[in-house]
Image (cartoon, grey):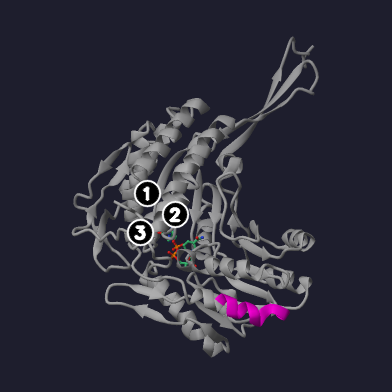
Amino acid sequence: MDNASHILTPPAEPRIFGFYLDGDWIASGDRQVFERASPAHGVPVTRIPKCTEDDLNAAVASARVAFEDRRWSGLSGTEHAAVLLNAAALIRERSEEIAYFETLENGKPIAQSRGEVDGAASICEYAAGAARSLHGDTFNNLGDKMLGLVTREPIGVVGLITPWNFPFFILAERVPFILASGCTIVAKPSEVTSATTLMMAEILTEAGLPDGVFNVVTGSGSEIGQALIEHDDIDMVSFTGSTAVGRRLLQAATGNFKRLGLELGGKNPQIVFADADLEDAADGVAFGICFNTGQCCVSGSRLLVERSVASQFETLLTERLSRVKIGDPLDPQTQVGAITTPAQNETIVRHLEGGPKEGARIVCGGGVLITERGQFIQPTVFADVTPDMALAREEIFGPVLTMQSFDTDEEAVAMANDTEYGLAASIWTKNIDRAVATMRRVQAGRVWVNTTITGGPEMPIGGFKQSGWGRETGIYGVEEYTQVKSVHIELGKRTHWIS
Ligand code: TXE
């Protein structure tokens, strides 16, 4: 069948999942279940168990035993790599199934899901190399009687909490690296998008991952997520989600001083200078706010444009946005799908309604297209936005762009940095001096010049300021899950202290 033109349909019945413990499925049994309806089609697509605290304890115990007996951490980088390469191949084999359920649960366009699944396989392949490259350091300059070694060791059991915006891709930006470090994992996906994390568990077992190294508990954030972050037998939590829950994590971590990796919200600037290729910039800005329906932590949601080209740019941008294809995410031609959750929809609508009350002007879009089956929001641009407005400060997490103008490079940088967040920034200019100077001063973990929302597993991701702690992917993403041990080895006869 031709993927580019064939339109899939939702399943007649929801697919039933268990959770994943010690290398096997556990059926929901008499536990409560969560039924997920497709946000674009309104029909139930998956059913997952609401795990209990006992289930979580069993998963943590399984990951703990698997870590302590060294069934995984004791293997070589070559053996870790073999499993990750097998996993990559299996992800590719099952790519259609994974992409289908990703779209059904999340509402994102199927073409995008396919790209993300392919990207996830590629990340596993990269991480296989990283597993073989992980190393420490030596100090051979301590004199003939001493050798110093710095070894890297896996930190232990990692709790992994992931959100609903990129259920499989965000998982793939973390799991292969955590595994490459030798750690074991208890994953807790978002309750609305658990299917593909559960598929990953099955794939890893088939790829040769020893039982107990990757466990998945499903259920709500406030119950299972909270119990996980408070768990004293978890050594580190990697969390991707809202800044509000990130803050709770800081408190919960005090119990056993667990290490934290946090990727939180963003309010990312798109800085367009007058000397940019404005056609390219307009296309990039449109993509940056529409991709994943604007539900990306790195969405370019604040357009800062040099005043001399502001009106020309507004025309170029709105013309492009009017041609974006919104609709059924199972249609391979669709570019913008459904908003993932009713709560997210409410947040976006609150801003669409609040913007004009604050004095902002809708330049294009603003429409909420609620069909009987799903919720869709037109890409929207607000002009006459001032820095104090909620529109300009809060993460909206939808296809809603604010537009502000600047006159000087200094002003552009000051406006870009006028946010509590620091996740990403994009700079559009053909002047290399200006691009580099701006890149150096902008406070963001990821900067794109003449492009946006792109990258690969080689480079680290993470945030400045209140956008988070730590880095994922790249060799940094493996080291993140290790701790460093200093070893002094004395050689020859000891010079005695007691003569
Ligand atoms: O996030 P939550 P929500 C932002 C975005 C969005 C807002 C709210 O602005 O509008 O957050 O989204 C789990 N202890 N981002 O409410 O609640 C939850 O089950 C432990 C940005 O969905 O942070 C899910 O698995 N875990 C973001 C995960 O946390 C808890 C992606 C994220 O959900 C928990 C998503 C608790 N007390 C939203 N409460 C990004 N950085 O990309 C919830 N969870």
In front: label 3 or label 2: 3
Ligand 1 located in image quadrant: bottom left
* Residue sitting nearer the eye, 257 or 264: 264
Asked if residue 316 is among those painted magenta in the image, a careful observer would answer yes
Q: Predominant secondary structure in magenta?
A: helix
Region of the chain picked out in magenta, as a range:
307-317
Helix, strand or loop under label 2: loop
Q: Earlier in the sequence, mark 2 or mark 1?
A: 2
How many numbered circles does the render carry?
3
The circle drawn on residue 197 is 1
Query: Vertically, is 284 above or below 304?
Result: above
Q: Is residue 156 visible?
A: no
Q: What's the distance in space between the residues labelled 1 and 3, CA to CA?
A: 14 Å
Kindly identify which residue carries mark 2: 162
Q: Which residue is mark 3?
A: 103
- Element class at badge 1: helix
Q: Position of residue 81 (x, y in %)?
A: 48, 31
Characterize the local packing of mark 2: few (<14), some (14-19) or many (20 or more) Cα atoms within 10 angstroms. Answer: many
Asked where in the image residue 41 lies, by quadrant, the reply is: bottom left
Asked if the residues shown at circle 2 and circle 1 are in contact, with their CB atoms under 8 angstroms apart, the answer is yes
* Label 2 beta carbon less than 8 Å to ligand 1: yes
Residue 39 percent coordinates (x, y): 32, 67
Does the magenta segment cover residue 35? no
| Residue at disc 3, secondary structure | helix
- Left or right, 181 with respect to 273, comes to left
Question: In the rendered structure, which amino acid carries the disc numbered 3?
Answer: Thr
Using residue 5 as the reference point, say whether residue 135 is left or right of it.
right
> Do callouts 3 and 2 mark residues in contact (Cβ within 8 Å)?
no
Name the residue nearer the viewer: 220 or 170. 170
Q: Measuring from the top left, give residue 137's x and y in whole percent.
A: 68, 29
Task: Kindly identify the residue that appears in the image at 79 percent across and 23 percent down.
Answer: 142
